[in-house]
Image: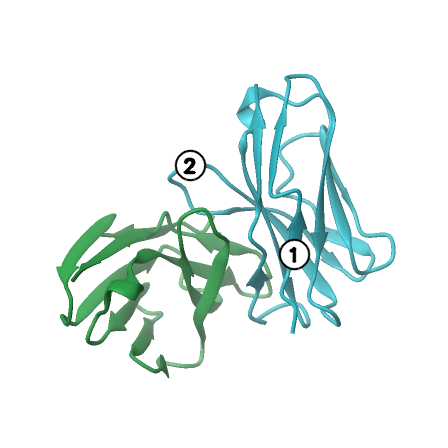
Chain colours: A green, B cyan
Amino acid sequence: KQEVTQIPAALSVPEGENLVLNCSFTDSAIYNLQWFRQDPGKGLTSLLLIQSSQREQTSGRLNASLDKSSGRSTLYIAASQPGDSATYLCAASGAGSYQLTFGKGTKLSVIP
Amino acid sequence: GAGVSQTPSNKVTEKGKYVELRCDPISGHTALYWYRQSLGQGPEFLIYFQGTGAADDSGLPNDRFFAVRPEGSVSTLKIQRTERGDSAVYLCASSLGGTGETQYFGPGTRLLVL
């Protein structure tokens, strides 16, 4: 059974810093990995999707990497802004599966 | 265009009552998913529809939970004899196809069972 872990559970950084959020998964036979953002009391917003054949994806100030062999993914946020404050969730989709297995998330606070 | 919508946004009910939660997916999306998110946890998969049929309902916790999608668009999650442990945020998502597609989530329905 796939298990997804995110470390740290919470992170506080000053505005302008670059930061990295970590995600690890136990079953390397994933189909893809998605990163989501969740604002308090809201649903999930998809940020990036990395197919199992890809190593990374970029969107604006966000860059996500995937290393299947080590069971890890990272989300890099450049030049953080207060508006980036939210909980970031990663989710792995198993091979041939549409089910997403989520981590518990990392709660990010960017201090002005 | 319109995203995934869910109604109601909040639902308070008493233990033992029946509730229905509605999801309206993005137009043209054939795949629809229900997840449940408890406080401080990531969402957990409940059920997946491809068109009108439930392709995988392995995540439904017990037979009190049931979901339908009769016309391949709107879906309703039904919970009978609600229990306090059913209190959570119920999230719906849709995708254009099935495996490997980006899933787009709605805002969720917050269910509180007293």
Chain at numbered mark 2: B
- Seen in the picture, residue A10 relative to B95 is either above or below; the reply is above
Chain at numbered mark 1: B
**In the image shown, does B3 or A67 lie closer to the viewer?**
B3
Residue A37 in view in this figure? yes
Q: What element carries label 1?
A: strand
Q: Do the residues under discs 1 and 2 have CB atoms within 8 angstroms?
A: no
Q: Which residue in the structure is indicated by mark 2?
A: B39
Q: Where is residue B45 in the image (x, y as percent from the top left)?
A: 57, 48
Q: Which residue in the structure is indicated by mark 1?
A: B5
Disc 1 to disc 2, C-alpha distance: 21 Å
Residue depicted at 87% across the width and 58% down the height? B71
Horizontal side of residue B50 vs B93, given as left or right: right
Badge 1 or badge 2: first in the primary sequence:
1
Dot 1 surroundings within 10 Å: few (below 14), some, or many (20 or more)?
Answer: many
Residue depicted at 22% across the width and 76% down the height? A78
Camera-near label (1 vs 2) is: 1
Q: Where is residue B67 in the image (x, y as percent from the top left)?
A: 75, 43
At label 1, the amino acid type is Ser
Q: Quadrant of the C terminus of chain B?
A: top right
At label 2, the amino acid type is Leu
Residue depicted at 57% across the width and 56% down the height? A99
Q: In which quarter of the image is the N terminus of chain B?
A: bottom right
Q: Quadrant of residue A68?
A: bottom left
Confirm whether circles 1 and 2 share one chain.
yes
- Seen in the picture, residue B42 relative to A54 is either above or below; the reply is above
Residue depicted at 69% across the width and 58% down the height? B32
Q: Position of residue B77 (x, y in %)?
A: 72, 41
- Seen in the picture, residue B88 relative to A31 is either above or below; the reply is above
Q: Where is residue A93 in the image (x, y as percent from the top left)?
A: 51, 62
Q: Quadrant of residue A16?
A: bottom left
Dot 2 surroundings within 10 Å: few (below 14), some, or many (20 or more)?
Answer: few
